[in-house]
């Protein structure tokens, strides 16, 4: 474990770890949107800014991408940090004024009004859905398209995401809860990725429990027996 | 020529090439650079080829299409050797005359010479033209004398002399020491000491090291890397080979944007020629050192000029920068130690090794050594590429080399460093060109774009233009950069459309600060420069837009009013015909009929300025 200080308190982090996870473990609250412990740090939302003093020089950086190092001093609530976070939060709120989580976070930071033209987007472009899909699920179904202010998270060529297994990991990962999953009869749909898949029926209880495409893929990857998914999770003794 | 297996064999080849070339024989060179291409040099080239084919007396007359000479304003350029007579704005029909009178009879054609703008004197040689006089062309100078597709031409001017010197008389550490001693700083914009970077890369643990040449020049109006790669690709290659030897790298990449087709082509030709001669590949010149280069063509994203985005792009991924807490010299391309330098930086290397660091470091200032190539464009008489010693003042570049502002207009600002550079006002024109001085003034050296602006340029509009470019070209990953540039553009648009308040300026400054401080890469880190520097030096102009709803430069349409002066109007009706909005009415004066002076209906006017352009009597007034 590597020791350093955070807001004057001695803390320690493991080699290869980042400052944000150390802070969260130590109970130091740093706002963040694009960080998730199950995937690699990305550094897109820029909310988790902190000031790091190293070799006598101070700089602002995102704590999720900054590696744990010895002899650093981390300051998570300096005036500079709070000032920058507030503006970033305001920018996100102006982009997605309808997101409940964004509204709450903004309010907590003392942002009462938005000084920019409000847009009606819902996606905050954190990229968590795509990263979970890549790194955890391994389906690589979605990715960012375009650059600059035209950047968006869409299924390939705005059509159906043909690699999507409708597992719903992105639905769970999305911090602003804008990826919807719908189940009707024997079909499951991930609305945002325009993907609808037939579900498999449990031989015991008769419930539709998971998309065919998903269970087949998992069965292949995990070298499971052909009849492994004939029975649903609940009925499997 | 086959593969050369020793430095002696290379020298023998050089001797043979030089023996075949008589410096007293006439030689015609035509600039084939991008600027001259645009002004029709290929037709001049065809005309010369035709004359040379037809004329019996053309035996022994050399002909060469060279790289960019730099003086693009005056293209197509033709230089006749050995007298070095420079003809400018040459047309195909001038060619037979040039051949007969100058090449054969040795006479000068006065009308094709450059005319001194103030004295009116005709100047016959390149060196005497004021545009070239103040320059110091140690990197760019050979462009005019070599055909970039002929390795012999590069060898003839002393090319590939530094390479054997490095390989056979210097240890890799000595090469690094020499480059460090010369204090070569990265010409791509950051100004990081190249020698230090090389050393860090050499010392980083890893099985393979890579060297990369960054030729993803993407600033609007800048084309120095392009012209260098197009006009003298071997100088860049030689620099890379020497660098690779110093670092211990077996493999290099030239990342060049595909929108530079001639650069892609010429560098490809250069690589295969160098391979054929054994200057690239296994056992270079019999030294035992192996190195080869591949060309990687970029899709044209501005952000791919950022080193980590560039490496990501070479790897086949989206060009998106990543955090550099672990430097690319330790973990870059494919997570291996990688040394990236810009085209111009690499081209400086052979010069340093050949002439020595002591010679090199005598040029320039304390902190910035050597020369820098700038593309001087915009509202300036002599647009083109100029290479100047570090430490020259901006005034000298704009007025002496650039020839000042056209049409008797007043200078307003010069923007250095490309889209993320800053605008420097008249009061700072004695600022010297130096990495540190430019940064202190709120701008930056950048890769060497220099856009001159005069009184008819609106600074708010300029800031808006660059924000529009950057909001499109940001990769879009960081909220601060993506949303920051977008919102700055939005606020600037509101100001130029008459909807601005004084709060807009404060908000722009706050946004600029956050974009700069909170973004991951240098694109976001420098993106607010055009906004912050124009607010810093031209705050009054912002206030004019906001408080008095007036654009002093008469650029921002929302504030313009077009009016036809009825006493000046000749009643010809041209303006009414030109108006696309049918906002102008009146009656055309005819022989027997009386006319009615034309007038603009403000409610219909779309402020396009067509009436102003079309009027031959200066009857249209802009307020």
Image (cartoon, rainbow, N blue to C red):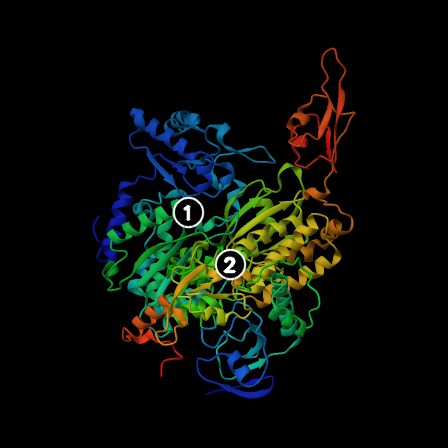
Residue B260 is labelled as 1
Q: Nearer the viewer, residue B385 or B12?
A: B385
Q: Residue at x 66, y 32 (%)?
A: B581
Question: What chain does badge 2 belong to?
Answer: A
Q: What's the CA distance linking mark 1 and mark 2?
A: 29 Å
Question: In terms of secondary structure, where does tag 1 sit?
Answer: loop
Residue A184 spot, x, y in % from top left: 46, 65
Residue B29 spot, x, y in % from top left: 39, 37
Q: Residue at x 68, y 56 (%)?
A: B535
> Image height check: is B407 above or below B516?
above
- Given this view, does label 1 or label 2 mark the residue nearer the observer? 2
Question: Can you tell which quarter of the image residue B614 is in?
Answer: top right
Residue B407 spot, x, y in % from top left: 64, 36
Quarter of the image with the C terminus of chain A in it: bottom left
Question: In terms of secondary structure, where does tag 2 sit?
Answer: strand
Res A202 visible:
yes
User: Crowding at label 1, few (<14), some or many (≥20) Cα neighbours within 10 Å?
Assistant: many
Q: Nearer the viewer, residue A161 or B103?
A: A161
Residue A52 spot, x, y in % from top left: 56, 77
Is residue A163 rendered to the left or right of residue B279?
right
Residue B159 is labelled as none
> Image height check: is B96 above or below A15?
above
Res B426 visible:
no
Q: Residue at x 66, y 38 (%)?
A: B408
Instruction: Look at mark 2 in the image and give the residue it sits on.
Output: A152
Q: Nearer the viewer, residue A43 or B427?
A: A43
Question: What chain does badge 1 belong to?
Answer: B
> Image height check: is A194 above or below B232?
below
């Amino acid at each position: 474990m590597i020791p350093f200080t955070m807001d004057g308190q001695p803390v320690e982090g493991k080699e290869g770890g980042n400052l944000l996870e150390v802070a969260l473990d130590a109970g130091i609250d740093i706002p963040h949107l694009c960080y998730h412990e199950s995937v690699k740090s990305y550094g897109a939302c820029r909310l988790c800014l902190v000031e790091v003093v190293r070799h006598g020089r101070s700089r602002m950086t995102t704590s999720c991408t900054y590696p744990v190092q010895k002899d650093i001093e981390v300051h998570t609530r300096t005036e500079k940090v709070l000032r920058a976070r507030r503006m970033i939060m305001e920018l996100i709120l102006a982009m997605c004024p309808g997101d409940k989580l964004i509204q709450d976070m903004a309010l907590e930071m003392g942002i009462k009004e938005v000084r920019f033209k409000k847009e009606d987007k819902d996606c905050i472009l954190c990229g968590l859905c795509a990263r979970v899909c890549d790194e955890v699920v391994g389906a690589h179904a979605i990715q960012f398209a375009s650059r600059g202010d035209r950047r968006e998270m869409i299924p390939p060529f705005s059509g159906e995401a043909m690699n999507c297994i409708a597992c719903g990991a992105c639905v769970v990962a999305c911090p602003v809860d804008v990826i919807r999953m719908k189940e009707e009869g024997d079909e499951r749909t991930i609305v945002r990725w325009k993907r609808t898949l037939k579900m498999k029926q449990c031989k015991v209880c008769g419930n539709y429990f998971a998309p065919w495409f998903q269970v087949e893929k998992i069965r292949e990857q995990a070298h499971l027996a052909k009849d492994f998914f004939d029975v649903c999770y609940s009925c499997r003794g | 020529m086959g593969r050369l297996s020793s430095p002696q064999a290379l020298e023998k080849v050089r001797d043979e090439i030089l023996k075949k070339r008589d410096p007293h024989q006439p030689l015609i060179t035509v600039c084939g650079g991008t600027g001259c291409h645009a002004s029709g040099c290929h037709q001049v080239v065809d005309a010369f080829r035709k004359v040379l084919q037809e004329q019996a007396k053309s035996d022994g007359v050399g002909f060469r299409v060279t790289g960019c000479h730099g003086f693009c304003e005056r293209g197509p350029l033709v230089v006749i050797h050995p007298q070095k007579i420079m003809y400018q704005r040459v047309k195909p029909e001038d060619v037979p005359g040039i051949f007969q009178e100058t090449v054969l009879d040795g006479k000068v054609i006065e009308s094709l010479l450059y005319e001194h703008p103030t004295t009116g004197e005709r100047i016959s040689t390149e060196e005497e033209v004021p545009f070239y006089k103040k320059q110091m062309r140690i990197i760019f100078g050979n462009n005019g004398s070599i055909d970039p597709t002929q390795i012999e031409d590069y060898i003839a001017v002393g090319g590939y002399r530094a390479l054997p010197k490095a390989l056979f008389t210097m240890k890799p550490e000595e090469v690094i020491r020499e480059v460090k001693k010369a204090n070569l700083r990265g010409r791509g914009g950051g100004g990081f000491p190249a020698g230090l970077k090389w050393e860090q890369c050499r010392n980083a643990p890893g099985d393979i090291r890579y060297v990369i040449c960054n030729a993803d020049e993407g600033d609007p109006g800048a084309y120095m890397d392009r012209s260098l790669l197009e006009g003298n690709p071997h100088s860049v290659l030689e620099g890379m080979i020497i660098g690779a030897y110093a670092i211990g790298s077996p493999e290099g990449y030239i990342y060049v944007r595909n929108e530079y087709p001639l650069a892609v082509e010429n560098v490809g030709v250069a690589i295969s020629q160098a391979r054929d001669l054994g200057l690239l590949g296994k056992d270079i010149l019999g030294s035992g050192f192996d190195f080869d280069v591949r060309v990687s063509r970029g899709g044209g994203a501005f952000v791919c000029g950022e080193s980590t985005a560039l490496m990501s792009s070479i790897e086949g991924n989206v060009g998106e920068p990543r955090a550099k807490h672990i430097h690319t010299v330790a973990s870059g391309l494919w997570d291996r130690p990688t040394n990236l330098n810009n085209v111009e930086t690499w081209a400086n290397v052979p010069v340093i090794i050949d002439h020595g660091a002591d010679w090199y470091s005598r040029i320039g200032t304390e902190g910035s050594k050597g020369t820098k190539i700038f593309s001087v464009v915009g509202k300036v008489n002599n647009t083109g590429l100029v290479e100047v010693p570090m430490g020259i003042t901006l005034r000298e570049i704009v007025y002496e080399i650039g020839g000042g502002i056209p049409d008797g207009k007043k200078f307003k600002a010069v923007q250095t460093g490309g889209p993320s550079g800053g605008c420097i006002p008249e009061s700072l024109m004695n600022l010297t060109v130096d990495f540190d001085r430019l940064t202190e003034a709120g701008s930056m050296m950048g890769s060497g774009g220099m856009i001159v602006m005069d009184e008819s340029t609106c600074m708010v509009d300029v800031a808006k233009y660059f924000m529009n470019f950057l909001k499109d070209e940001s990769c879009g990953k960081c909220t601060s950069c993506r949303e920051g540039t977008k919102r700055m553009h939005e606020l600037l648009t509101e100001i130029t459309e008459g909807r601005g308040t004084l709060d807009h300026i404060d908000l722009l400054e706050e946004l600029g600060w956050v974009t700069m401080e909170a973004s991951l890469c240098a694109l976001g880190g420098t993106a607010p420069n055009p906004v912050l520097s124009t607010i810093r030096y031209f705050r009054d102009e912002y206030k004019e837009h906001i408080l008095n709803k007036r654009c002093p430069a008469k650029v921002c349409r929302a504030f313009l009013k077009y009016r036809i002066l009825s006493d000046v109007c000749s009643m010809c009706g041209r303006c009414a015909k030109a108006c696309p909005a049918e906002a102008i009415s009146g009656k055309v004066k005819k022989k027997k009929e009386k006319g009615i002076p034309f007038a603009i209906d403000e409610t219909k006017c779309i402020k396009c300025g067509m009436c102003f352009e079309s009027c031959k009597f200066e009857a249209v007034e802009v307020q």
